[in-house]
């Protein structure tokens, strides 16, 4: 798969021992790290798609820590070398990864497991409740060549 310009994928390592498991997600010395805004958790119930949106100011850093999600990205940036490219990632603890999503790239995710998918995002900007940096379109009624029903 050809990655959308600016998208970065970091394979994560789950380290088990007799007490449980540990997984580093994002470090300040990673090549994927740009700056810290906040860390938040979001979930989706089985079969639910949370899509599409983009940001003008922030990059996102997504991973899934429980359940399984299908993360999709669409490059609508006309000046991008990957204009109109779609990327898709299946993320779970069985195949853990961190996906960095640059600003202006549409993205969304769908829970594809039988249990709720738990997603951690570490965006580069803190959420501004008075002026949110979120620009949304309908998950199904749009011009993006991607079908969340699959």
Image (cartoon, grey):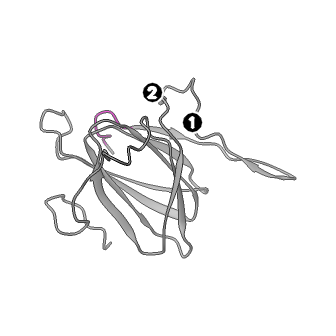
Quarter of the image for residue 145 reads bottom left
Q: Could you tell me which quadrant the C terminus lies in?
A: bottom left
CA distance separating discs 2 and 1: 10 Å
Residue at 26 percent across and 66 percent down: it is 139
Q: How many marks?
A: 2
Q: Residue 37: percent from the left, percent from the top?
A: 47, 35
Give the camera-side residue of 77 and 4: 77
Q: Residue 127: percent from the left, percent from the top?
A: 41, 44
Does the segment drawn in magenta span residue 150?
no
Give the camera-side residue of 17 and 110: 110
Task: Name the chief secondary structure element in magenta.
Answer: loop
> Is residue 75 shown left or right of residue 126?
left
Q: Residue 64: percent from the left, percent from the top?
A: 54, 55
- Find residue 59 and name its label: none
Give the camera-side residue of 7 and 27: 27
Magenta residues span: 2-7
Residue at 13 percent across and 32 percent down: it is 79
Residue at 57 percent across and 36 percent down: it is 26
Q: Mark 2 or 1 closer to N-term?
A: 1
Secondary structure of residue under mark 1: loop
Does the segment drawn in magenta span residue 5?
yes
Give the camera-side residue of 120 and 91: 120
> Is residue 62 shown left or right of residue 102?
right
The residue carrying mark 1 is 26
How would you rate the neighbour count of disc 2 (Cα within 10 Å): few for under 14, some for 14-19, many for 20 or more?
A: few
How would you rate the neighbour count of disc 1 (Cα within 10 Å): few for under 14, some for 14-19, many for 20 or more?
A: some
The residue carrying mark 2 is 34
Q: Residue 113: percent from the left, percent from the top?
A: 52, 71
């Amino acid at each position: 798969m050809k990655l959308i310009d600016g998208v970065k994928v970091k394979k994560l390592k789950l380290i088990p021992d007799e007490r449980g498991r540990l997984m580093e997600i994002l470090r300040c010395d990673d090549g994927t790290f740009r700056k810290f805004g906040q860390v938040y958790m979001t979930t989706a119930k089985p079969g639910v798609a949370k899509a599409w949106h983009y940001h003008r100011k922030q990059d996102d850093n997504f991973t899934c820590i429980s359940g399984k999600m299908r993360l999709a990205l669409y490059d609508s940036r006309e000046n991008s070398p990957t204009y109109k490219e779609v990327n898709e990632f299946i993320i779970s603890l069985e195949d853990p990864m961190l996906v960095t999503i640059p600003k202006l790239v549409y993205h969304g995710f769908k829970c594809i497991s039988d249990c709720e998918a738990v997603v951690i995002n570490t965006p580069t900007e803190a959420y501004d409740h008075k002026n949110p940096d979120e620009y949304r379109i309908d998950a199904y009624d749009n011009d993006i060549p991607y079908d969340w029903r699959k």
